Image (cartoon, rainbow, N blue to C red):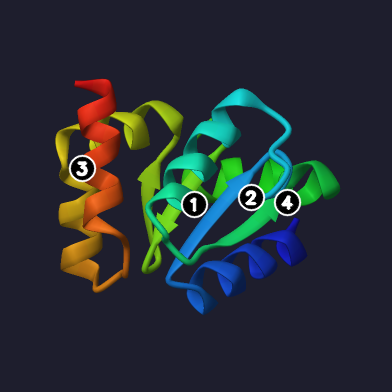
Amino acid sequence: MTDAKTQIKTTIDGNDVVLFMKGTKMMPQCGFSSRVAGVLNFMGVEFADVNVLADADIRQGIKDFSDWPTIPQLYVKGEFVGGCDIITEMTLSGELDQLFDAKGVGYSKEAAEKIREANG
């Protein structure tokens, strides 16, 4: 498991935004992963995707690393942000925009507004 932890840490440290998910950002393999990847893609956020289905050690390792039991998991600038429900709530409240602004992560403010309008 040490190798998985090292790989996870290296991935998180090497990318501004990382989504540990089931599937890939272009082909999610569960609804929760699809929702978070869809939000990030729609908002134009550049992010690394890690398919936990491809490696059982990474799949369990990320749960241990974050002490969070579910996938997907979003990291921004090395900080664990949350899973699907938290990201959905943050998107709709504008907190995700604030986090991206504070961390210097590029995204489309217009797209974020459209998400809120469509779900308001």
Q: Position of residue 86 (x, y in %)?
A: 33, 32
Mark closer to the chain start, 2 or 3: 2
* Separation of marks 4 and 3 at Cα, in angstroms: 34 Å
In the image: residue 117, left or right of residue 14:
left
Residues at circles 2 and 1 in contact by the CB criterion of under 8 Å? yes
Mark closer to the chain start, 4 or 1: 1
Nearer to me, 4 or 73:
73
Mark 4: which secondary structure?
Answer: helix
Q: Name the residue under label 2.
A: 25
- For label 2, the crowd category at 10 Å Cα-Cα, with few meaning under 14, some 14 to 19 and many 20 or more, is many
The mark total stands at: 4
Q: Name the residue under label 4.
A: 58
Q: Name the residue under label 1.
A: 41
Mark 3: which secondary structure?
Answer: helix
Quadrant that contains the N terminus: bottom right
Q: Mark 3 points at which residue?
A: 113
One can see residue 70 in this view: no
